Amino acid sequence: MDNLLEIGKIVNTHGLRGDVKIVVWMDYPEDFESIETAYAAVKGGYKKLTVQGIKYQKNNLIVKFKELNDINEAEPLKNSVIYAEREELGELPEGTHYIVDLLGLDIVDEDGNHIGVLEDVFNTGANDIYDVKREGKKNLLLPVIDEVVKNIDIENGRIVVNVMEGLDDEN
């Protein structure tokens, strides 16, 4: 199912009625409320789950899925990654992208010179960091800030960046 995006992970069961605790990987956990159907990664595929209720607990969600009626049905799904269909997640705000759409894009400088390929994106709390794989050099870490990331062009498969002085210690 190519249209599935990772949205979180079931980290534990909650109570005896089949509720599960989910760590949400979306920027806004309340976006989970727009999801009617989720998919848990299980051996050999996905288990379709219908969202019945959501409660907030600190930074996590307690979710009741229709298909999980007791702790014995929920227990096997511990540590399963949860997915949702892209269409259920709605439109992203202008200038926001799903990480999965960015991975593998070419990273080029403002003159069009190839720097590397986006291998990973991670968050430091202050901002995201692009982890750029380069040929024959160690990876380049670029902060995702306006001074560095100049243009994201998913259609043409590239991100234009300004590698500010001090970011690349292997000139």
Image (tube, rainbow, N blue to C red):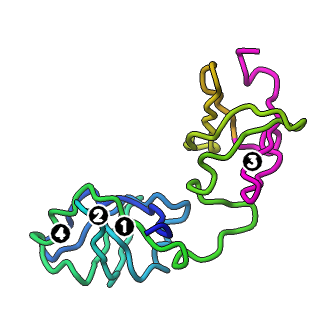
Going from the N terminus, do you reach mark 1 or mark 4 first? 1
Task: Say few, some or many: other residues with alpha carbon within 10 Å of mark 2 (under 14 / 14 to 19 / 20 or more).
Answer: many
Going from the N terminus, do you reach mark 2 or mark 3 first? 2
Q: Secondary structure at mark 2?
A: strand
Kindly indicate the quadrant of the structure image that contains residue 48. bottom left
Q: Which residue position is annotated with label 1?
A: 61
Going from the N terminus, do you reach mark 1 or mark 2 first? 2
Q: Which residue position is annotated with label 3?
A: 158
Task: Say few, some or many: other residues with alpha carbon within 10 Å of mark 4 (under 14 / 14 to 19 / 20 or more).
Answer: many
Which mark's residue is nearer the viewer, 1 or 3? 3
Q: CA distance from mark 2 to mark 4?
A: 10 Å
Q: Residue at x 73, y 39 (%)?
A: 107
**65 relative position to 165: left or right:** left
Stretch of the chain drawn in magenta = 144-171
Q: Secondary structure at mark 1?
A: strand
Name the quadrant of the C terminus: top right
What secondary structure do most residues of the magenta stretch adopt?
loop
In the rendered image, residue 49, in percent from the top left (x then y), is placed at 30, 78
